[in-house]
Each structure stands twice: as structure tokens, then as C-alpha cells.
């Protein structure tokens, strides 16, 4: 039986695929605090704490592969802190290929959440206005990862 939330996820996934194919960014999956209302069978949080093209490429490729494999049955969060927060900045202070921000925006359309460490933001004198719209600020990035693990998320560090 397909629950209301699973139907909605599939519906928004189809809209998201159509949006990506058409080059639009209008389709957005519905989020609660960490994802959809019902529980996903799989939950994973990726640590993102470096700022270079190869690293961003590895993290985002892995995230995409998990979404491709598990579809609407996985909840994925990318927890960015330290230099990795640059991925989520509107005006990053470190140089990297901005195609990774485009990839992150695309993944967000499929329900991937991006958390930005408030402590790191403070050290950079950033506010929430300095973040991409896909990012959610959390007070302490590592505490966020710990709390997600306590909720059953698997922790991945690449």
C-alpha cells in the first residue's frame, strides 16, 4: 500500500525529474524538519568538511548514487562545517567549481537536505542570508551529526 507521503514523494520526484530535464528549478520536494512525514527505511548523513573540487565531487556523486538506488526510501542529509561550508555559501571565499552548487541544488529537489554549521558561519561572519536557499543553519555541525546518528542515521565521512 502506498501511503500519502510516499505518493507525494513519487509525485514530486517525477516533477523534479521533469524540472531537471527542462532546466528549471521550480519543483521542490516537501520537507519537514529532516524529510518527509513518514519514516524512510534508510537514513544517512554525509560529513562535508573540505572545500575542493575533487572532494565535493565525491560527496555529491555518492549522495546522487544513494538517491538513484533507494529513490523515495532514503533520507539524505549533507552536514557542512569547516571549509566544507563553502559549498553552501552564496559568495564562497574559497575557489571551487560552482557546478557543485548547481549539483547540490538539483539534489535538494530530490529531498536531500543540506545543513550548515552555525559555529563555522560565525567564524566567517556569515549569517543565514549568506547561505544558498537550500541550506538550513544548525547551531553546531558536529552536534547535528551526533543527534542525527541518535535518530538512526548512518554517518559517512569521505
Image (tube, helix red, strand yellow):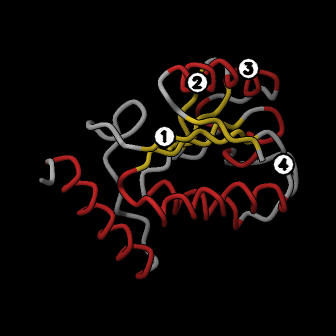
Give the percent coordinates (x, y) of residue 32. 34, 34
Q: Is residue 7 above or below residue 135?
A: below
Counting every numbered tag in the picture gives: 4
Name which residue lies at 63% across and 26% down. Answer: 145
Element type at mark 3:
helix
Q: Quadrant of residue 148?
A: top right
Q: Residues within 10 Å of mark 2 (few under 14, many from 20)?
A: some
Mark 1 or 2: in front is 1
Q: Check residue 119 in the rendering and tell me which mark sits there, or answer none.
A: 3
The reply to whether the C-beta atoms of the residues labelled 1 and 2 are less than 8 Å apart is: no
Q: Residue at x 69, y 37 (%)?
A: 80
Q: In terms of depth relative to the viewer, which is nearer, 129 or 78?
A: 78
The Cα–Cα distance between marks 1 and 4, rounded to whole angstroms, is 24 Å
- Residue 52 vs residue 47, the one in the foreground: 47
Q: For numbered disc 2, what is the local secondary structure?
A: strand
Q: Which residue is mark 2?
A: 138
Depth check, front residue: 156 or 115: 156
Q: What is the spatial separation of the Cα atoms under label 3 and label 1, in whole angstroms?
A: 25 Å
N-term mark: 1 or 4: 1
Q: How far from the left and from the top, in percent, is residue 158? A: 78, 48
Q: Which residue is mark 1?
A: 43
- Residue linked to disc 4: 51
CA neighbours of label 3 inside 10 A, class few (<14), some (14 to 19), many (20+): some
Amino acid at each position: 500500500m502506498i501511503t500519502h507521503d510516499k505518493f507525494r514523494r513519487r509525485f514530486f520526484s517525477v516533477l523534479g525529474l521533469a524540472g531537471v530535464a527542462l532546466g528549471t528549478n521550480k519543483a521542490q520536494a516537501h520537507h519537514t524538519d529532516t524529510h518527509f512525514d513518514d519514516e524512510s527505511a534508510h537514513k544517512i548523513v554525509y560529513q562535508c568538511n573540505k572545500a575542493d573540487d575533487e572532494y565535493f565531487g565525491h560527496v555529491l556523486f555518492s549522495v546522487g548514487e544513494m538517491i538513484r538506488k533507494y529513490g523515495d526510501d532514503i533520507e539524505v542529509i549533507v552536514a557542512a562545517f569547516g571549509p566544507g561550508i563553502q559549498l553552501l555559501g552564496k559568495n564562497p571565499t574559497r575557489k571551487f567549481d560552482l557546478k557543485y552548487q548547481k549539483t547540490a541544488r538539483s539534489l535538494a529537489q530530490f529531498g536531500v537536505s543540506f545543513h550548515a554549521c552555525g559555529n563555522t558561519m560565525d567564524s566567517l561572519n556569515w549569517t543565514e542570508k549568506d547561505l544558498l536557499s537550500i541550506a538550513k543553519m544548525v547551531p553546531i555541525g558536529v552536534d547535528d551529526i551526533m543527534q542525527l546518528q541518535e535518530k538512526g542515521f548512518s554517518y559517512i565521512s569521505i
